[in-house]
Image: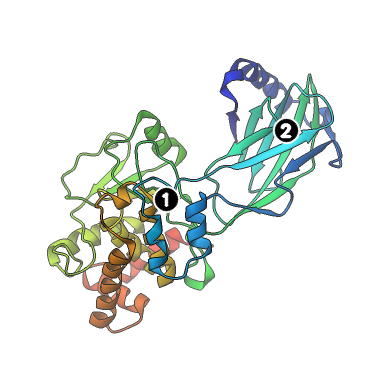
Amino acid sequence: MKTVLKNKPRVIALILAMTMIAALFGCGNNAVKEEKGELINASPSSGEVVTILPESLRTFYANYENPKSVDPFVTGLDIYQPVPVKISWTCEQDADYYIVGLSMKKNIEISGSEDTTYFVTVDNFVEAYELFAGKTYYYRVFAVKGTDVLASVLFSFKTENYIRTVYVDGVSNTRDLGGKVGEGGRKIKQGIIYRGAAVDGVTKQGKVDFLEKLGIKTEIDLRTGTELSVFRKDINVISVLAPCYVNSGMGIELPEYQVGLAEEIRAFANPDNFPIYFHCAIGRDRTGTLAFFIQVIAGVSEEEIIKDYLTSFFSVSGTADDPATPSNYVGNLTVMINWLKEQYKGNLKQSVERFLIDIGITKEEIKAIRANILEG
């Protein structure tokens, strides 16, 4: 259970409200008036599908046709960051303040519910940030007047099933690798694997975002293997000399880079390492190469892998080496895919598994990775 104070200018009143919540949470349902919805009406309306992406990125995913379709969006701006879902309501009775319970489970009670976030506000809206993609959320609004509580019926909405980006202050190109459909129709779990750019410039608030909001336990740094992480005293840090693509001078075909590749992939076989954040400098090439292998192991389609890869071009760091263009760099990814298929004689999944075994990853480790990252 988590409680969030909203509307900071009125924080003193809200702190006083919090003391009331403690009493309300212990008073049971006798103090709560259950209504049929005629006194509290809310939006999003039940069953509504809502977006969690900024307009340009949502348009890209909704209208994706081919890798070149993203070229007009290369701007050198961070335009990937998530947008909140605004929950608003009207109440026909006067209230001192409101409490909104939000959860992916239906049992939302004023007395406290597991896996529920409670927002406290004196306004008639709250904003919920960085929700999971493609999930149904439930919420109730509680209007508090003195010791009386008026409860709404249970409302629900569903988030669009495209991609989940996240915000970490001082770090660019950050997103969740989860939500994509993999082997057997199972999806990669959300909230356990994050990718992005280097964390060297992370702010004080960004550290809170990283350690508390995302709950990162392991950072995989894919640069040279010698960097000292700003998080080295807080979490497990794995630093490797990582490859990108093929025929790049630091490609996956080179033995000296295969050592690092095996080490970074092997980290996903250990369940104690999650949630994991992995990055290189700008979060596109070496990061994109590792993301490619993890997604192929999970059984994600080639098209979905390319979409995820292209999302980097909606960020400052992902377009740092101007005049980089998405179609050019997708070419690098495609060359690597074709090389794997030609060298290891099979479809994408077969070729990648044969390659990984060739560089020292065992079949048991591949199975362990799937078990760790796929739902169900």
Residue drawn at point x = 60 percent, y = 25 percent: 7
Quarter of the figure with residue 13 = top right
Placement of the N terminus among the 4 image quadrants: top right
The answer to whether 248 appears left or right of 353 in the picture is left
Instruction: Work out whether residue 11 or residue 25 is closer to the camera in this orientation and state it.
Output: 11
* x and y percentages locating residue 190 in the rendered image: 49, 53
Compared to residue 351, the image places residue 74 above or below, namely above
Mark with earlier residue (1, 2): 2
The answer to whether 15 appears left or right of 36 in the picture is left
Q: What residue did someone put label 2 on? A: 110
Q: Residues within 10 Å of mark 2 (few under 14, many from 20)?
A: many
* x and y percentages locating residue 308 in the rendered image: 41, 60
* x and y percentages locating residue 290 in the rendered image: 30, 60
Compared to residue 257, the image places residue 27 above or below, namely above
- Residue type at tag 2: Ile
Find the residue positioned furthest to the front: 72
Can the viewer see residue 336?
yes
The CA distance from mark 1 to mark 2 is 33 Å
Q: What residue did someone put label 1 on? A: 175
